[in-house]
Amino acid sequence: MPPFLGIAPGHGSIAAGSGKTARHIAWQRLGSIPESQINCKYSFLDILFGKIVDPHFWMHLNLDFSPQRKYHEVMPVDPHDLRLAMRRWTTGVTVVSAAARAVRHGMTVSSFTSVSLDPPLVLVSLDRESSTHRLVEQIRSFGVSILSDDQRGISDRFAGRIYTDTDRFVGLDTFNLVTGAPLLAHSLAAFDCQVVSSFETGTQTLFIGEVLAVKTGVEGFPLIYFNQDYRSLMK
Ligand SMILES: Cc1cc2nc3c(=O)[nH]c(=O)nc-3n(C[C@H](O)[C@H](O)[C@H](O)COP(=O)(O)O)c2cc1C
């Protein structure tokens, strides 16, 4: 909880004793706010209850959000809360794949995004503990197949939710474009990419791939992932 949230009710007497109002103290605790701003028309409760919609108010406050304020120390995000919030984010579903000599592997990935059209760049975020990550890091290329809503079983298979042979592609129709990454037939679209940059952050590596070849596939509706479940645009 930010410190200023705790002081308003309990510090009425201090405020009275020092000649300052609770509003005054609360405002000062909010940041380095000039004296002239403190006696503004809004009260601390207005802030607390989110009543201030005037963007000029916030701009003029000139709140200092620079790293030295160490907001992450003041308000640590509860991982559970973050997970709940992220479940409300809707994504499509892809399979990211790679191949090196006799080995081919892939995993279900929702963190896929277009970065730039010219040059043609896409991004995927892969868990560094995953086998697919190891393969992509080694050969510096990957494929992406966008799944359709009748490929839920494939998503589960490549997420390791249902047991398969170590080769997750067994029994599936695949094709190659340039790098040899196995791409899924019957997907909505497929991209073949060469890694041009990568950033390690948190548990993940963000791989940015230059798209070397692309192929649109079947016409259909995308597989959608929302709140831990698959959805379809048809539902
Ligand atoms: C819908 C869905 C989306 C997923 N998206 C990602 C993702 O974006 N990045 C990631 O690292 N793992 C993601 N996963 C988890 C991986 O698919 C899972 O850990 C997989 O088993 C890793 O396989 P591997 O270790 O054999 O490569 C997702 C799983 C599901 C079901």
Image: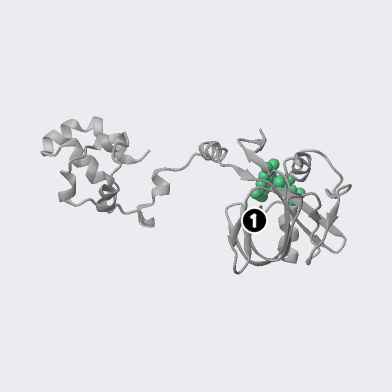
Q: Position of residue 184 (x, y in %)?
A: 80, 52
Q: Residue at x 23, y 43 (%)?
A: 27
Identify the residue under disc 1. 124
Residue 218 or 187: which is nearer the viewer?
A: 218
Residue 30 placement, left or right of 206: left
Indicate if the residue with disc 1 has its beta carbon within 8 Å of ligand 1.
Answer: yes
Q: Residue at position x 41%, y 47% from top?
A: 73
Callout 1 secondary element: strand
Q: Residues within 10 Å of mark 1 (few under 14, many from 20)?
A: many
Query: At 39% from the left edge and 56% from the top edge, which residue is drawn?
Result: 67
Amino acid type, mark 1? Val
Task: Where is residue 146? Give x, y as percent.
Answer: 71, 50
Q: Residue 75: x and y, percent?
A: 41, 43
Residue 201 vertical placement versus 18 (above, below) = below
x and y percent of residue 36 in the render? 15, 50
Judge by depth and name the residue closer to the eye, 89 or 62. Answer: 89
Question: Looking at the image, what colour scheme do you see?
Answer: one colour
Could you tell me which quadrant the C terminus lies in?
A: top right
Foreground pick, 33 / 114:
114
